[in-house]
Amino acid sequence: MDKMMFHPLQSKAVINPKVRPLKQQIQNNHKFATHLQTALQPNGKLVVSKHAQERIQQRGIHINEAHWKQIADKVLEARQKGVNESLVLLKNAALIVSAKNNTVITAMDREEARTQIFTNINGTILLDQ
């Protein structure tokens, strides 16, 4: 036991994998989530909740197909910018829209909207045409 023998172990080189910064990973996940949500919506059209449909009929609000398309496009744009709940102001109506779910939650005419306080809204779309 006077002689010690040293046998070095051979190991493979460790290669550090390329790690993307967390901010970039979050942005990529957000983009994916937005595209997935858009793909799940029927043709990018807005869904009008039963409550909103009743309010539109009760209040005699008329929105033509071209305006619905314009609203849907703007809601999509708002969602891509991170908006979850939006107030959409038209010439004759105000709509509360869940951009996250692509759903019109409620509707009122502009006169009624004038006296309201809107909460839990993090975006506004103005379409006064």
Image: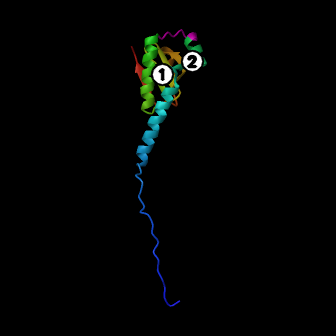
SS assignment for the magenta stretch, majority: loop
Residue at 42% over, 32% down: 81
Which part of the image, by quadrant, shows the C terminus? top left
User: Of residues 6 and 36, which is closer to you in this image?
Assistant: 6
Query: In the picture shown, does residue 102 fall above or below 128?
Result: below
Label annotation for residue 44: 1
Q: Amino acid at mark 1?
A: Gly
Seen from the viewer's position, the closer of residues 18 and 31 is 18
Depth check: 92 or 79 in front? 79
Q: Which coloring applies here?
A: rainbow
Q: Is residue 120 above or below residue 24?
A: above
Image height check: is 37 above or below 8? above
Nearer to us of marks 2 and 1 is 1
- Mark 1 secondary-structure assignment: helix
Looking at the rendering, the stretch of residues picked out in magenta corresponds to 57-63
Relative image position of residue 111 (x, y in whole percent): 49, 14
Q: Is residue 72 magenta?
A: no
**CB under 8 Å between discs 2 and 1:** no
Question: Can residue 115 be seen in the rendering of this structure?
Answer: no
Secondary element under disc 2, as helix, strand or loop, is helix
Q: Can you give x and y, in whole percent of width and height, for residue 37 in the image?
A: 50, 29
**In the image, farthest residue toward the bottom:** 2
Q: Which comes sooner in the sequence, label 2 or label 1? A: 1
Q: Nearer the viewer, residue 1 or 74?
A: 1
Question: Which residue type carries mark 2?
Answer: Ala
The residue where tag 2 is placed is 52
Give x and y (percent) for residue 128: 40, 16
